[in-house]
Image (spheres, coloured by chain):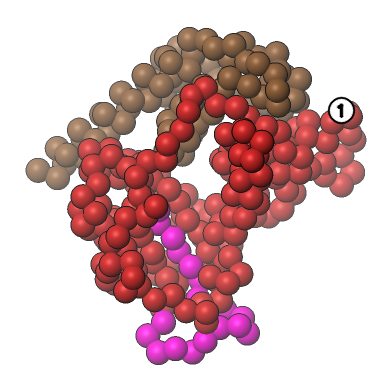
Chain colours: A brown, B red
Amino acid sequence: MTRGILFEIAPEAGVSIAEQTLNPEDLYKADEIFISSTNRNLIRVGEVAGHAIPSGAVAKQLDDLFEAYISDYVTRRAAAAR
Amino acid sequence: MIHRHVFHNEELRPVEKVRLSPGQAGLISGWGLFTTLRIFHGEAFAYERHWRRLEKDAAIIRLPMPYAAAKVRVSLHEVIRANGVTEGCARIYLVYNTYGHWRSDEPGMPQVDLIIYTADLPRYREPVRLGLREHGRHAGSPLAGVKTISWLQNVWVVAEAQKEGLDEVVHGREYLCGEERQDPDPAAQFRLPGGRDPGNFV
């Protein structure tokens, strides 16, 4: 669910997104990796199968974007309930 | 751990008063669906999306959907309020009771059980350490991407990884019959054919 929302809101914030097949080697040489989760929004990945993954700015940018989306949702729901 | 108050079918009850039956055929075999919702400020985030996915997946696995979205939302918020949750998570389960030989004929058992409960957010560290798991997704299955209650593959893989000090696992898909293998690593591919959603990492 989190990923689906990110696919909608990220392009609006200028972050391009593509879905494609990945090999483990693609992960090992990534500039940055994060996973998405209902319970944890976006979480930075520091290691994949023993390969260190650098941190970057995209996860933070998308996490902020997602938090804003949540806040807007909750505000709209609260307004609708009044 | 889950919070004390649980919604089961038509009632909000303390968990110790909820009765599930061995005669619920889907409970034993895993014929059912679930979704996990985030609760922010006492509100179930993106409920509409979660419900749409449940309906879509119910059509795929031929699970009857006798419950209405609006009514379940009311029940969900009953649970949230009863447990005093402002920040946390909730789960909605739909369990198919009345199919096949291994079911009971208990009076009052609905066709599909509705179970809703809440919990605190799980603790986690960041950044996370991921492992790779071969054959973690059966991409050729008609159930690929469906969030069924047959969830052992996911929780077992993570439990095994955590024994090794990892946090989560990337599930590699299997190679399909007739598909030419181009990489020596069987964990090499992580997308489903046709761009279908392989389901969440766990």
Q: Residue at x 46, y 33 (%)?
A: B124
Q: Which residue is mark 1?
A: B183
Which residue type carries mark 1?
Answer: Asp
Q: Which is more toward the observer, A34 or B15?
A: B15
Chain letter of disc 1 in the image? B
- Which image quarter: residue A22? top right
Q: Residue at x 27, y 69 (%)?
A: B13
Could you tell me what secondary structure mostly forms the magenta stretch?
loop
Q: What is the x, y in percent for residue B104? A: 52, 87
Position of residue A57 relative to residue B191, above or below, is: above
- Tell me the SS state at disc 1: loop
Q: Would residue B5 appear left or right of B189 to someone viewing this image?
A: left
Q: Which residues are magenta?
A: B91-109
Q: What is the total number of numbered labels drawn onto the structure image?
A: 1
Q: Is residue A23 magenta?
A: no
Q: Which is more toward the observer, B85 or B101?
A: B85
Q: Determine if residue B70 is in view.
A: no
Q: Would residue B103 appear left or right of A72 to someone viewing this image?
A: right
Q: Badge 1: how crowded within 10 Å, few (<14), some, or many (20+)?
A: few
Position of residue A28 relative to residue B128, above or below, is: above
Q: What is the x, y in percent for residue A35? A: 54, 28
Q: What is the x, y in percent for residue B202? A: 57, 41
Q: Is residue B99 magenta?
A: yes
Position of residue B105 relative to residue A39, above or below, is: below
Q: Determine if residue B82 is in view.
A: yes
- Which image quarter: residue B100? bottom right
Position of residue B63 relative to residue A6, above or below, is: below
Q: Which is more toward the observer, A5 or B105?
A: B105
Q: Residue at x 39, y 76 (%)?
A: B19
